[in-house]
Image (cartoon, rainbow, N blue to C red):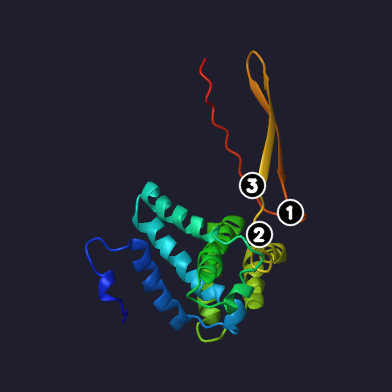
Amino acid sequence: MLFLPSAGIRKDFDADALASSVAHQWFPLKIAVKDPSQDAWMVDGMAQFASLLYFEKTLAPVEAQAHIHTALVKALGYEGNTTIRQAGGLDRDTPDYRALVQYRGAYMFRMLQWVIGDENFDKLLARYMQQFTNTPVSTEAFEKLASEVAGGDLNYFFDQWVNGSGVPEFSVDYTVFRERTATWFAEHVKQDLDLFKMPVEFQIHNGWRS
């Protein structure tokens, strides 16, 4: 049984708020965490991630991307030094808690899915539910499980995105070399963090006309 405020049941309802409300009622019942002041992102972040996944599964890509982009903007709304884990101790009704725990926590799961791949991520969620439905989970236990499923140490990932603060800013320098039959690009990408490890995708749009 799910309880929704009457204000949320109307023709022009806020789809983001409704999906998030449903997910936030379900996850605390299924998954408990050892220390809410440090591990809250695994409940509220996972719930927000599930609401975004719902949009991806039910809407056209362009429509789903609008909801995902809105969540990303909210995730980047906080610019301080508090980490996702530390934010679990904040008041749940504050903008900082929602930005860090709920929205940035959701994007932590999306980035983890990208890093380990869809197949491994599906296995991770299945084992996560099997192992921790009736056992309170900690961030360390989830990290260990994710590393086992991925087949490699993911400590760097959790240190960057869960135990660390800030996001990298990238700058790109490139040189174009044109030949008679081809065009070559020499690119250099820099980021401002001392230690950072993450896959980076490149996409080149050809805007030239012959």
195, 151: nearer the viewer: 195
Residue highlighted by disc 3 = 200
User: Compared to 65, does 84 lie above or below?
Assistant: below
Camera sees residue 170:
yes
- Please tell me how crowded label 1 is: few (under 14), some (14-19), or many (20+) other residues with Cα within 10 Å: few
Q: Which of the marked residues, 1 or 2, is nearer the chain's N terminus? A: 2
Residue highlighted by disc 2 = 166
User: Compared to 205, does 16 lie above or below?
Assistant: below
Residue 81 position, x and y percent, is 67, 65
Residue 88 position, x and y percent, is 58, 76
Whether the residues at callouts 1 and 2 have beta carbons within 8 Å, the answer is: yes
Q: Which of the marked residues, 3 or 2, is nearer the chain's N terminus? A: 2
Q: Residue at position x 38%, y 58% from top?
A: 55
Relative horizontal placement of residue 163, taking residue 109 as reference (left or right): right
Q: Amino acid at mark 2?
A: Gly
Residue 175 position, x and y percent, is 70, 27
Label 3 vs label 2: CA separation? 17 Å
Q: Nearer the viewer, mark 3 or mark 1?
A: 1
Q: Amino acid at mark 1?
A: Leu
Label 1 vs label 2: CA separation? 9 Å
Residue highlighted by disc 1 = 193
As helix, strand or loop, the secondary structure at mark 2 comes to loop
Q: Residue at position x 58%, y 58% from top?
A: 111
Q: Amino acid at mark 3?
A: Val
Q: Residue at position x 56%, y 85% from top?
A: 136
As helix, strand or loop, the secondary structure at mark 3 comes to loop
102, 42: nearer the viewer: 102
Q: Residue at position x 28%, y 70% from top?
A: 8
User: Compared to 210, does 203 lie above or below?
Assistant: below
